[in-house]
């Protein structure tokens, strides 16, 4: 009977050692999921903002607007994004801004990086393009 108790007492710190070995990997996994969620939210915001900007661009022509005002609409529609950081751009192009029936293209680019515990795992640019026909 005493022999069984000695074996159980010898394994008393096993769970703590296993937790110490697995906790960093679990933390990296959870942080990676959180970073992916932030990047996906930024992408959804960017896509919605370019859609709003393209729709507003085709209507601004009627009110005397120009591509710069359409680009500002994109930035206003995505207040949660920091447009002052390097690589964040919005461009609005149209071959002929004054003729109804031509296409206007709104392109927005926003940088991202996946940073896990101080290591940049991946980085790049999110991009969204919307094309609408001028009214």
Image: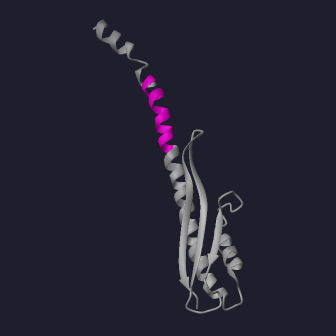
Q: Looking at the image, is 102 positioned above or below residue 131?
A: below
Q: Is residue 6 left or right of residue 51?
A: left
Q: Which residues are magenta?
A: 17-30
| Residue in the image at 64% along x and 86% along y | 97
Magenta stretch contains residue 20: yes
Q: Is residue 78 left or right of residue 114?
A: right
| Residue 11 percent across, percent down from the top left | 38, 17
Quadrant holding the N terminus: top left
| Residue 133 percent across, percent down from the top left | 54, 86
Q: Is residue 51 left or right of residue 20?
A: right
Q: Nearer the viewer, residue 15 or 93?
A: 93
Q: Nearer the viewer, residue 28 or 65?
A: 65
| Residue 20 percent across, percent down from the top left | 48, 27
Colouring method of the image? one colour
As drawn, the residue found furthest toward the top would be: 2
Q: Looking at the image, is 28 positioned above or below residue 33?
A: above
Q: Hey, which quadrant is residue 41 in on the image?
A: bottom right
| Residue 59 percent across, percent down from the top left | 63, 87
| SS assignment for the magenta stretch, majority | helix
Magenta stretch contains residue 125: no
Q: Is residue 51 left or right of residue 7?
A: right
Number of marks present in the image shown? 0
| Residue in the image at 38% along x and 13% along y | 9
Q: Nearer the viewer, residue 109 or 23?
A: 109
| Residue in the image at 29% along x and 7% along y | 3
Q: Looking at the image, is 124 positioned above or below residue 74?
A: above
Q: Hey, which quadrant is residue 110 in on the image?
A: bottom right
């Amino acid at each position: 009977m005493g022999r069984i108790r000695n074996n159980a007492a010898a394994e008393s710190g096993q769970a703590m050692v296993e937790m110490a070995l697995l906790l960093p990997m679990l933390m990296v996994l959870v942080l990676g999921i959180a970073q992916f969620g932030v990047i996906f939210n930024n992408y959804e915001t960017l896509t919605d903002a370019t859609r709003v900007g393209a729709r507003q661009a085709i209507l601004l022509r009627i009110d005397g607007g120009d591509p710069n005002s359409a680009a500002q609409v994109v930035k206003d529609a995505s207040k949660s994004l920091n447009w002052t950081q390097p690589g964040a751009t919005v461009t609005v192009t149209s071959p002929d801004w004054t003729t109804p029936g031509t296409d206007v293209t709104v392109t927005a680019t926003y940088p991202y990086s996946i940073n896990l515990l101080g290591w940049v795992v991946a980085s790049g640019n999110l991009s969204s393009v919307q094309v609408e026909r001028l009214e």
